[in-house]
Amino acid sequence: MVEGNRGETPMTFTVTASRPVPQPIVLCAATLGVTAMPGSDFDTLVRCTVMPAGATTATFTVSVNGDRKREPDEKLALLVGSLPGQWSGDPIAYGTIVNDD
């Protein structure tokens, strides 16, 4: 996503199940800076949400902070987990903050 010159822009990550979940699942996520800096390039996220029974998706939104600095594109990661036995999906997703200056 493009970072913008000021303010915050939402970067949404969608967790997707291959079929509707039979019971509610608690999913927790946390951000990790890869080349992007938490607190500067994006706001740190540590949050849990419930994917209700019958659902196939849940979302987590990270706020990306715009600036006017010339810099390379930057990456962050979202780590997702749940209680043992509830979720067996890929635990990591990457987002790229595209510099637009």
Image: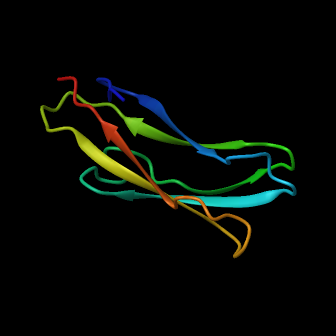
Q: Is residue 70 visible?
A: yes
- Residue drawn at x 63%, y 65% is 88
Q: Residue at x 69, y 42 (%)?
A: 57
Residue extending furthest toward the front: 18
Specify the quadrant that holds the C terminus. Answer: top left
- Image coordinates for residue 43, horizontal then vertical, percent: 44, 47
Vertical comparison of 80 with 55: above or below = below
Tell me which residue sits at (12%, 31%) in the image. Answer: 70
Q: Quadrant of residue 56?
A: top right
Instruction: Give the x, y percent position of residue 42.
Output: 38, 45
- Tell me if 52 is positioned left or right of 40 in this view: right
The number of numbered discs placed on residues in the rendered structure image is 0
Residue 87 is left or right of residue 36, and the answer is right
Q: Is residue 64 left or right of residue 15?
A: left
In the rendered image, the vertical position of residue 33 relative to residue 70, given as above or below: below
- Nearest the viewer among 54 and 65 is 54
The residue positioned farthest toward the bottom in the image shown: 84
Q: Height in image: 85 above or below 53?
A: below
Q: Position of residue 59 (x, y in %)?
A: 63, 42
Q: Judge from the rendering whether residue 82 lies leftward or rightward of residue 14; answer left or right.
A: right
> Which residue appears at 32% of the width and 44% of the height?
41
- Scheme of image coloration: rainbow
Q: Quadrant of residue 25?
A: bottom right
Kindly tell me whether residue 39 is visible in this rendering: no
Query: Image quarter for residue 67?
Result: top left
Residue 1 location (% of width, % of height): 36, 29
